[in-house]
Amino acid sequence: MSLSNSRFDRLSIKKAYEYNKAISHKLNKICYPLESTYGIKLLSYRRFYLQGGLLHLTTHPEWCEHWYENQYWISNSFQDRVNRLSKQSSLFYIWPDIPPKDRVYNALYELNIWNGVMIYKKYNDCIESFGFASAIRENSQVKNIYLYEKDILEHFMLYFKDKIIPLVKSFERSILLPYAIDIPNNSSTEVQKQNFRNATKIKNHYLRMNGEDIKITYREGECLSLLSKGKKIKEIARQLELSPRTIEFYLSNLMEKTQLNSKVQLIQLYQENDGF
């Protein structure tokens, strides 16, 4: 993953930087509720197109200048997060208490921008990255927002896109940085995970009920999990490659073990246990 130093690339970088400066007042207006309510001063938005091209917008003028001048497109740890996104659709990463050995994070820290979080979402054609951070290095309390009020950030991300996409849509292709992202094939990782699962096979599940642990078999747990997702008996049987009569048998066993009288009550118990 690299960005060359051709004249074309230098012009692209300049154009993207000038556009970011031109709309900075609009970006800060959009993000003002985030700053005034929660003390989150920095918003960094990136969209990495899988076919090439990087859109970058940020609210912090000093960081914006520093980012483009030093070509801080990604941090050293970015590739690790991309690797994880090859097998999941989203990622939530809270910055460490002190900056790691990474030029991007060290630069942020020196500019008094810290206590941040990165949220990644993968789509068919791109990866979106939202970065949030405080402009006060000692404001570690902002991390409580990331940990306990993540829904606030999710809400703001939708609000931001509602405001920003109409603003940049007609210009986006002309202000993309010529950056290519690579999502690797993780077949070796999947083999490793499967080997781990094989070595740690689960034979039983436990449901917490009335101060006791109710032991149920792995297969009973599978049936209960699918039932709680709204699957019908025949659908569960088809998915587990068993007969409907066998599924009824497992569910009957569950009701006997839990002393419950209906599938609805079983589902409620499963939900109370937050699944397995």
Image (cartoon, rainbow, N blue to C red):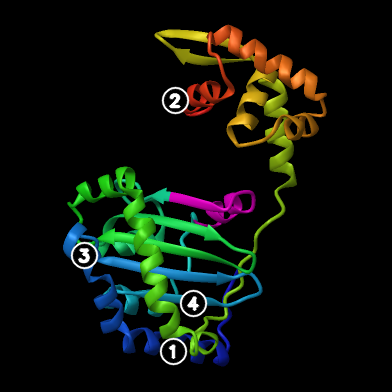
The amino acid sitting under disc 1 is Lys
Rounded to the nearest angstrom, the CA distance separating label 1 from label 4 is 13 Å
Give me the residue at 22% from left, 48% from top: 140
Rounded to the nearest angstrom, the CA distance separating label 3 from label 2 is 37 Å
Residue 4, given in percent of the width and then of the height, sits at 58, 80
Q: Residues within 10 Å of mark 1 (few under 14, many from 20)?
A: some
* Residue 165 shown left or right of residue 206 in the figure: left
Give me the residue at 52% from left, 59% from top: 121
* Magenta residue span: 78-92
Looking at the image, is 224 positioned above or below residue 122?
Answer: above
Rounded to the nearest angstrom, the CA distance separating label 3 from label 1 is 28 Å
Q: Earlier in the sequence, mark 3 or mark 4?
A: 3
Q: Which corner quadrant holds the N terminus?
A: bottom right
* Residue holding disc 1: 14
Residue 245, given in percent of the width and then of the height, sits at 79, 19
- Asked if the magenta segment contains residue 82, the reply would be yes
3 and 4 marks in contact (CB < 8 Å): no
* Residue 16 shown left or right of residue 31 in the figure: right
* Residue holding disc 2: 272
Q: Nearer the viewer, mark 3 or mark 1?
A: 3
Disc number for residue 216: none
Give me the residue at 35% from left, 51% from top: 151
Q: Nearer the viewer, mark 3 or mark 2?
A: 2
